[in-house]
Amino acid sequence: MMTQDRDYEDILRRALTAAAESIEPGGDGLQRIRHRLDSRRSPRSAFSRFAEWLDLYGTRLLVRLDPLIEGARGVLRRTGPLSGPLLALASFLGRLFSPRGRRRAGGHRGQASPPGRLGPAGAWLRPVLAVSAAVAIVVVGVVILNHETGTLINPTNNNMGTTSPSSSLSGAGTTANSKRWKLPLGVKTAPAVGTGQRNYAPAAPALPAVACTPTPKPAVTTSAPSGGATATPTPTPSGSVTGTPTPTPSGSVTGTPTPTSPATSGTATAPAAMVLPYDAGDPAVVECGASPQPSQTP
Amino acid sequence: MVTRPIDVTEALIANPAVTHAAPAVTHAAVEWDADRAVTAIYSEHYRSLVRLAAFLVRDTSTAEEVVQDSFVAMHGAWRRLRDTDKALSYLRQSVVNRSRSVLRHRMVVDKNTPKPPPDMPSAEHGAIIQLERSAVVSALRSLPDRQREALVLRYYGDLSEAQIASVMGISRGAVKSHTARAMAALRAVLERDS
């Protein structure tokens, strides 16, 4: 058995050597290699190499994505109004990248490619068009599927009463309220209370949030306002103080602003904004004017 | 008195002007080396590489293109290689990989091409016919690609199992398996034909 294997190995070796002797490569190989090296060094060839790369890998990608594209076509057929143009686009993409179409246009490697329907620029325009069309199809498909499943991305669908963690009492954060309500110059809607202050009594009445602009009166000190949910401008020389009233356990609003947040301890430099201690209901904002009333300032 | 040898770092510190001129000089030297290496390896191994590729892609003109592409790639990778043996190994691996790409591409094209009439010769018929002068080579054509690669590298390229494994990117056990299966299939074909 071993000798028979060796016989076959010898036969194969001799046959391969004899067959190889009959293969004689052309004599201009080195010139062609140098020509390729020279053309590779030219800046123009970078684009053509990118086009070749895109052509090769785009084709490979689309061949692998063929079942996915077929599945997407099936989904698009069921979706309705947009399916017509998308199906047309998908079929155009398929025709553009089918090897039959490529053979019609260019043929195999090494052969001179006559200009196809896209003209001489088709060699690089075709893959670019195909990849961009594929991306467009995927994007539209994702949007349609999201719409179908009711999970459409809604940028304004966040909780109106909560702020992002980045927004603090210093007034840097903007909520959706500030987009919906036109405020006079200098008046900002206060950001709703942060996450650490959300355990308020649920029975508290919905009162508007008050945002005021401090008057630039120097040397006016802030004192605790007495009374209900009224605006308390807190003018300080350096700017304004945003008081955050601390809710009482009973749920009634006492309006005693005790800065609890570390950001408001001491003299805060936040824009003047007074927020009532709950965020229930409609985020209405009561404007108190460009300057606070004298009666409100102690 | 024995002088201590000075290493490269110390020489560069002692003569900092060298460090500024080094990149341009190195780049030009590498380019020059790469050009020389291409010429040297071409004169020694181009023909055998074309024949190896011709066995794999079954077409002489395509085999030449594959080998020329590999030389261009080797020129670009010369900065990493810088050695003729490594360059030759790189070339063989590149030829095998590019031949695989050609076969894959050809398979996709053939799948979508309308079949020609039986009496009409295909485009590559003329190139293939010179490879099919012996029954062994025609039997070799009927083998799967990996088995054919293993046989050609083993019995035409005279590579060891380790070299074949490196070129094909598989393990030595897989090389043994491919070779044994290919030999069994080849023997069955030849015995059936005879």
Image (spheres, rainbow, N blue to C red):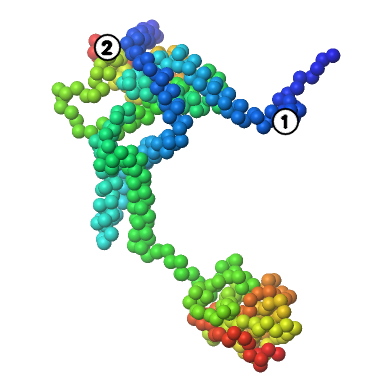
Task: Name the residue carrying label 1.
Answer: B16
Of B54 and B39, nearer the camera is B39
Query: Residue at 25% of width from left, 16% of height from top?
Result: B129
- Residue B34 image offset from top left, x and y in percent: 52, 22
Q: Is residue B157 above or below residue A279?
A: above
**In the figure, residue A10 lies in which quadrant?**
top left
**Left or right: where does residue A7 sit relative to residue B72?**
left
Specify the amino acid type for callout 1. Pro
Residue A266, label in figure: none
Q: Position of residue B142 (x, y in %)?
A: 29, 21
In the rendered image of this protein, does residue A206 appear above or below residue B120? below
Above or below: residue B174 compared with residue B44: below
Tell me which label, 2 or 1, sits earlier in the chain: 1
Host chain of mark 2: B
Q: Secondary structure at mark 1?
A: loop
Residue drawn at 34 percent across, 59 percent down: A144
Q: Which mark is residue B133?
A: 2
Type of amino acid under label 2: Arg
Question: How many angstroms separate mark 2 from mark 1 (CA)?
Answer: 65 Å
Q: Nearer the viewer, residue B164 or A181?
A: A181
Q: Residue furthest right?
A: B1
Disc 1 residue crowd, few under 14, some 14–19, many 20+, Cα 10 Å: few
Q: Say which of B111 and A98 sits in front.
A: A98
